Amino acid sequence: MYIRRISRKNKNGSVTSYVQLAHNERNPKTGNPQAKVLYHFGREDEVDMDGLKRLAASISRFLGDEPVASEPKDSVQLSLLDSKTFGTAYIVDSLWHELGVGQAISKRLAQRKYEAPIERAIFAMVANRALDPSSKLGMEDCVKRDIALPGVENFEVHQGYRAMDFLIESDVDIQREVFETVADLLNLEVDLLFFDTTSSYFEMDDEPEEDSLKQPGYSKDHRPDLPQVVIGFAVTRDGIPVRCWVWPGTRQT
């Protein structure tokens, strides 16, 4: 059983709508369901809407449900325009500024004439890797639809590549300034720095020998089932290399 609205077009071109109480019955000849009118409420513009609300409330009480509340006449209809993940990106942004990363980048951008927000593009790529790693192309949809990044309304792939070109030219200065900021922030006395430079895996037809450097282990590429090799080195704060090694073997120099 349901309330339905039917419309009729008049000779003058106007349309009159009527409200009816109906339910569906199966036609014994065709077997198809068809509406059977149980009650005519009359023209839609003349229907007692308050009376219908009282009827709905009475039916709800009979069924043991909560009464149907009448909507205020001045109620506003709301529609959802957008929904994004909010919060975690702001934590990353707070760390970004507290560690001085954004300041170090902006300082070097002041010497350039970029029209695009390069610092925010770099932040967007870092936040993406920290929260939900994806390709730069995938970031366009992610920033537009899924996640709210402070100061980033949209991300375009060409901005990401332009930002990476800038980083290649300025990475040494930026890294040094960020390091000095962190050392000062945490009151660190650092004489030796460790760099994990690369991680590679090998695809081999034969199993590696027992004393080979190429043994299974942790894989940054998510292939711990294959032989791994990690090369790293340590340097003094002045940038002088003091030791190199290969893991998981034991070779050192």
Image (cartoon, rainbow, N blue to C red):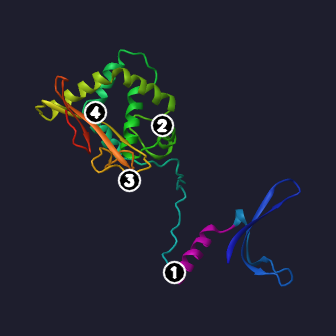
How far, Cα to Cα, is label 3 from label 4?
39 Å
Q: Whole-Å distance between the Cαs marked 2 and 3?
A: 28 Å
Q: Determine which of the numbered discs, if any, sits on residue 61 in the image.
A: 1
Query: Looking at the picture, which amino acid does disc 2 mark?
Result: Lys
Compared to 86, does 232 lie above or below? Answer: above
Q: Residues within 10 Å of mark 2 (few under 14, many from 20)?
A: some
Dot 4 corresponds to which residue?
97
Can you tell which quarter of the image residue 8 is in?
A: bottom right
Image quarter (top left, top right, bottom left or bottom right) of the N terminus: bottom right
The magenta region covers 47-63
> Pointer 3 and pointer 4: residues touching (CB < 8 Å)?
no
Residue, disc 2: 136
Mark nearer the N terminus (3 vs 4) = 4
Between marks 3 and 4 in the image, the one whose residue lies nearer the viewer: 3
What amino acid is labelled 1 in the image? Arg
Quote the CA–CA distance across marks 1 and 2: 56 Å
Task: Please name which of the two marks, 3 or 1, marks the residue nearer to the observer.
Answer: 3
Give residue 225's mark. Answer: 3
x and y percentages locating residue 123 in the rendered image: 37, 34
**What kind of residue is marked 3?**
Asp
Q: Secondary structure at mark 3?
A: loop
Q: Residue at x 25, y 44 (%)?
A: 249
Foreground residue, 182 or 219?
219
Q: Is 177 situated above or below 39?
A: above
